[in-house]
Amino acid sequence: MVELMNCPMMNKKIDLAYCVELQMMSSNEIKKTADEKEITEQMWNICRRCTKQECPTPDYIER
């Protein structure tokens, strides 16, 4: 089972665990990896303002 959510920063469905990881990167709790080097500061600002920052819950559950 995969928990997915709509990510306004990436403009697509992403895994909820990746969402939490991106949130931690946006607040500098963990370092960005090579995969996130292409994300612009404007995109990080979208992540920081996302409602999922307060309560990351899945929008979809797929089997």
Image: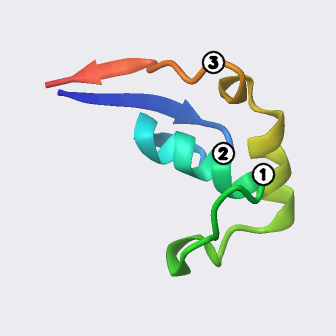
From this viewpoint, is residue 15 visible? Answer: no
Q: Tell me: residue 40, above or below residue 53.
A: below
Mark 2 packing: few (<14 Cα in 10 Å), some, or many (20+)?
A: many
Q: Tag 1's secondary structure? A: loop
Most foreground residue, 31 or 7: 31
Q: Are marks 3 and 1 in contact (CB under 8 Å)?
A: no
Where residue 48 appears, as percent x and y from the top left, is: 80, 42
Task: Provide the residue designation for mark 3.
Answer: 55
Residue kind at label 3, given as amino acid type: Cys
Secondary element under disc 3, as helix, strand or loop, is loop
Q: Say the numbered circle drawn on residue 27.
A: 1
Looking at the image, residue 2 sits to the left or right of residue 59; the answer is left
Where residue 38 sits in the image (x, y, percent)?
65, 76
Q: Which residue is mark 2?
A: 23
Tell me which amino acid carries mark 2: Gln
Residue extending furthest toward the left: 63
Residue 55 sits above or below residue 22 on the image: above
Q: Residues within 10 Å of mark 1 (few under 14, many from 20)?
A: few
Q: Please indicate whether residue 14 sits to the left or right of residue 10 in the image.
A: left
* Coordinates of residue 43 in the picture (x, y in percent): 77, 56
In the image, what residue occupies the spot 44% across and 35% down? 16
User: What is the CA distance from the residue labelled 1 to the residue labelled 2?
Assistant: 6 Å
3D distance between C-alphas at marks 3 and 1 = 15 Å
35 sits to left or right of 53: left
Residue at position x 64%, y 70% in the image? 31
